[in-house]
Image: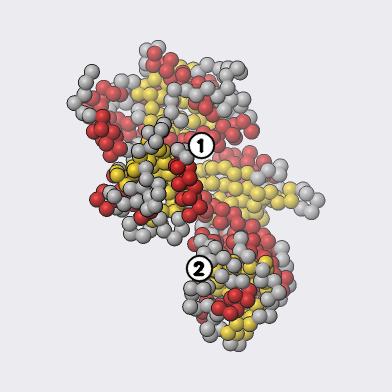
Amino acid sequence: MTFAITDQELLQTALETVREAVLITDSQLARPGPTIVYANPAFRELTGYTAEELRGQTPRLLQGEETDGDLMQSLRQQLSAGEVFSGETVNYRKDGRPFRMEWTIRPFPAEGEPRYFIAAQRDVSAVRNLEQQRQQLQTLAEIQTRVGTAGLDLQELRDQVADIALAVTGADGAAIEEAEDSEMVYTATSGRAVGSVGMRLPISGSLSGLCYHQRESIHCRDTHEDTRVARVAADHVGFRSGFLVPLIHQDHCFGVLKVYSDRPHAFNEGDLQLLNMASHVLASSLSDARLFKGERDRRSLLVDSLPILISYIDNQLRYVEINVAYNRWYNLPTEQVVGRRVAEVMGEEAFESIRPYMLSALAGERVTFENRFPHPDGTVTPVEVDYTPVRNTHGDVQGFFSMIRDISDLKRAEQDYLTGAFNRQGFDDRLAMACATSRRYLRPLALIFLDLDHFKSINDSYGHAVGDDVLRGVAKTLLNEVRDSDIVSRWGGEEFAILTPETSLKDALGLAERLRQALNEHHYAAVGRITASFGVAAFDPDEVERDFVRRVDEALYKAKVGGRNRVQQASHLSRSHHSTLSSMPF
């Protein structure tokens, strides 16, 4: 069979179509580096450059201040050795905006002297930001606990705050400076700053004084280049780069929290963001100790302002403490939540879905899971939940801290753009989590694969727009038929996967049959009725995820070979078989 289209035209068409950013350069590694010979539309959309602006340039035009120089050196070394390189760093769009880029670069051809380097790239900024936010929230909760244990002795609390700032930023030195008349005085120090207590700087003419007066954080990247710095004092304590954050409580600024390094450009904006967030709770505690000498707020300004639900639950599963996010969520005052059982507040049905995780926390386990959290108005929000056990001095678990974070944005990032179901990445993440949960707690889990029969003929006869409408309709039918806890994913093309936690093989086969009938009975505009073939398997705790998927895939294949429009149960796990990959790409 011959085609009118050339191989080169076919390759270019494929590259123009894929959603992943692709960049092709020549193989010149000596400076100024390889030259760009091609960038597909996805790459141009990601970076904001046109094809004409990219052609003939080097990829260095994407680099900037926060690009990892060591990683770029490793890239050159690996490519020089003929190896495939994978990495992640900060790149910059044409308009100067930074983003986190994950990419893989392959020499071409793979054997012999390469002529080109082919880079496949994707923007992972949203995912990394969510990960950073989660880590920051966990760190902030730990800070709250540590500050709470420091008591109300003013100097003890000052020292604790300096130690915390040093620890969470990885700085060389940290100090608290408080205003006295026209000077900023070091009242507590940690790390390399130890020994500097009592040192004084003029408010006028110092970076500390500027931070105190303006009530704004300052990021000093290099004291040898920043004209605002009192250079002699900075060199005396080894301050070459750092952050200064005002300590403000109830609209009163009483000092500055400083962290620094003896190296220039030692910190990034994520460090500053964390320190800014932490400064609220640190300032609140310091202010209490300074002003009231024995009275401390149990409710931290920081914890109450966080966009997550934080509570302490005792071993009777009653709320002992909550932050104001609970008041907003349930539209109830604190006194109508604290002291009540969790099941009373959130409802028995919702409570039963999380009860096993709470019991695990009371048994001493750190628990993290995803769930759908109900609002009193009946709507639900996808959340990530963390339970951290709290022990007394004898080691007995007295209760646990609960942190509940809205992950709606993450869910949207994991949606298939056409059908609204989970995409492959979202499904893979949940498959790994579901299998781990099933294996650990010996809970039932099933997986269903379905493939639309003769779907190619729909695209060929009616066009891809009609085919897309059919796929959207199929996804809607599946989502309407399954439970909220089931995971529906577009596996690829006309294939869908359904992950069903807490479901036996018998129940999964029944669900697959109901789905088969529902799809067959639905009338689709332009094409009429369609059918689908199904493969079904129950998870065996002794198998790995790939074997689980392989067995379902083989069952689906048997269903199609056996006549289509039918449900096929997978074979049992072969104990002699270890992680054989199916013919499907993973």
Left or right of 519 on screen, residue 276:
right
Circle number at residue 430: 1
Residue at image point 58% right, 76% down = 234
Residue 533: x and y, percent? 39, 20
Q: Count the marks: how many?
A: 2
Foreground: 362 or 75?
75
Element type where label 1 sits in the image: helix
- Seen in the picture, residue 182 relative to 51 is either above or below; the reply is below
Residue 372 visible from this viewpoint: yes
**Quadrant that contains the N terminus:** top left
Residue 517 visible from this viewpoint: no
Left or right of 112 on screen, residue 163:
right
Residue 302: x and y, percent? 57, 64
Residue 261: x and y, percent? 59, 66
Residue at image point 41% right, 31% down = 111
- Farthest residue in the left direction? 4
- Farthest residue in the top direction? 562
Q: Reading the chain from its start, which is encountered first: label 1 or label 2? A: 2
Please tell me how crowded label 1 is: few (under 14), some (14-19), or many (20+) other residues with Cα within 10 Å: some
List the residue tagged with mark 2: 221
Looking at the rendered structure, the kind of residue marked 2 is Arg
* Residue 310 location, quadrant: bottom right
